[in-house]
Image (cartoon, helix red, strand yellow):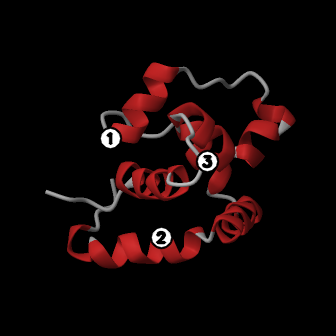
Amino acid sequence: MNRCDFSSISTCLKNHISESNQMSQPDFLYELFEDFMDDPANQDFSMDNGLVCRWMTGQTKISPKISAYYSKPSNQRKLAHMFNAWNGSRLLQKAISNNRKYLRSD
């Protein structure tokens, strides 16, 4: 069953970006969460390959620290700006429309 969750959306984005730029999963998430990683409050946060792989495959939920950071409206705008730079809004809309019946709030 397909679901519209972090794993499916991030995989869709990474696959699109990787078509022109071979990028590892950790590099992709460092770029996706660049604002979070650059925030001095998160300087002790690190993403190891195993954890990133589990996030990308949906085996583990994304870090609550990342979720809390992007739950703030000002940080949501930063993430939206990054999506626009990647043309990610169009990709996100496509992924959601393709998986609309599977939307879940996990």
- Left or right of 3, for residue 68: right
33, 71: nearer the viewer? 33
Question: CA gap, disc 2 to disc 1?
Answer: 17 Å
Q: Please identify the quadrant where the N terminus is shown.
A: bottom left
Q: Circle 3 sits on which residue?
A: 68
> What's under tag 2, amino acid-wise?
Leu
Q: Residue at x 30, y 34 (%)?
A: 59
> What's under tag 1, amino acid-wise?
Gly
Q: Circle 2 sits on which residue?
A: 92
- SS for dot 1: loop
Q: Residue at x 86, y 34 (%)?
A: 40
Q: Which residue lies most toward the right here?
A: 40
Location of residue 75 by image quarter? bottom right
Location of residue 105 by image quarter? bottom left
Question: CA gap, disc 2 to disc 3?
Answer: 21 Å
Q: Residues within 10 Å of mark 3 (few under 14, many from 20)?
A: few
Q: Can you tell which of label 2 and label 1 is closer to the viewer? A: 2
Q: Circle 1 sits on which residue?
A: 58
